[in-house]
Amino acid sequence: MPAQLNERKFNFTEASVAALPFAPNGKRIVYYDSYVQNLALRVSSANKIYYLVKKIAGQTVFSKIGDSRNTALKDARKQVYELMNHANRGENPNDDKRRIRESITVQEFFDEYYFPDHSLLRKQVASCKMDNVSMRLYIPADIKHRKLLSLSRADMERMHNSIWKRTNSVYSANRGLKLMRQMFNKAIDWGMQCHNPAARIKLFPEAKRDRFLQPDELPRLFAALAQDPDMHFRAFILLCILVGQRRRNMQSLRWSDISFERRALYIKKTKNGDPQAVPLPEQALVILRELETFKTSEWVFPSKQSRSGHLENPQVRWRSLLKRAGIENMRLHDLRRTFASYQAINGASNEIIGKALGDKSPAVIPIYARLTEAPVRQSIQNAANSILPMANLLPADPRKNRTRPKGRNK
């Protein structure tokens, strides 16, 4: 690390590069490596990018090597030596890059750059899958095989409309447009000289879903669920209702994530990137203790059919369950909304519901910081007590049915 922050030349190390502060918004600071000549590090408010810096034909040329977060320093130095061989012959290293960029198609850019260098590195698993699905199913073939830099705003508007007409889904059309918008943004970030033709195109209005299990539907669902032969699937659905967490977090739940002593489960990485401790109602603890007696895996919901070893795709069984229960237009994610709805019915505030669900919006983050676990736990317990009397699977509150030992004073 340089002795003074304004010293722009020092011996780069992985630690010193990582320790450099990001630049203020709108500013860029360039540091130079004293160990390898012509290696520079351009620091912005969000990135630290390695560059080759070389005067060619009287002009200072910056040739991008890679982001310091995914390019090792030794690899950056190696690339400098390789690029210098071209530069010493008077060749501009950016010319070859420019020719490649001008000829690359949308599909090639996605496969070779966007997905491996952005989706896999920056996004969670579910978002990576969505990027793949959007490219594979939503982006039309005539767009995939076009040169990326040849696309215009009119092309993006036509694509947006064509996806909607083909799929009859505004969600699919919007996802396709969002993917193209993100790809162009990353192309610009990575040095392509272009504009974003997908920017500022208005998305189709998306109706906010407010579906949750109604009081007359809960008994039918529970009755159909009681007939399901798979105890793990039965427990999975019940816990999704009683705990209100996202389906993927529940599917990948490990026994090590559960603390019976603290009556809580721990989600190491939520959708917003933060860990979360989730208080468990008594009814959920009863279900988990029963499952624990049959434990054969590190996973709470094991699966021999999946690569991961845990439950991954319960959609087929879920649809079968709904058919037996005579319930329509219900998604697994709606169980999370059901949990939140019964919290609200029992008088929980929006802040407590948000804390229980693990949702964070800028408006309520300061309030989360002041909430203790007690009101959140009580709200979760109240919701469970309201839901389960509609089923004969568990008592509303197991503590009320415990037999009092003889001889103990009342």
Image (cartoon, helix red, strand yellow):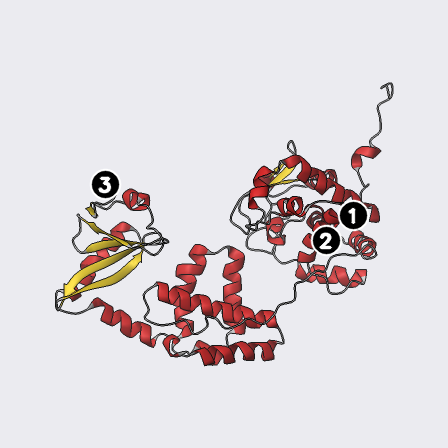
Q: Which residue is mark 1?
A: 387
Q: Quadrant of the N terminus?
A: top left
Amino acid type at circle 2 is: Thr
Residue in front for this viewpoint, 377 or 107: 377
* Residue that appears at 59% across and 47% down: 364
Three-letter residue code for mark 3: Gln
Which quarter of the picture shows residue 371? top right
Label 1: how many residues lie within 10 Å, few (<14), some (14-19) or many (20+)?
many
**Crowding at label 2, few (<14), some or many (≥20) Cα neighbours within 10 Å?**
many
Q: Is residue 101 above or below residue 2?
A: below
* Spatial separation of the CA atoms under disc 3 and disc 1: 62 Å
Question: Disc 2 designates what residue?
Answer: 338
* SS assignment at label 2: helix
Q: Which mark is residue 208?
A: none
Residue 4, label in figure:
3
What is the spatial separation of the Cα atoms under label 2 and label 1, in whole angstroms? 9 Å
Mark 2 and mark 1 in contact? Answer it, CB < 8 Å.
yes
* First of labels 3, 2 by sequence position: 3
Q: Earlier in the sequence, mark 3 or mark 1?
A: 3
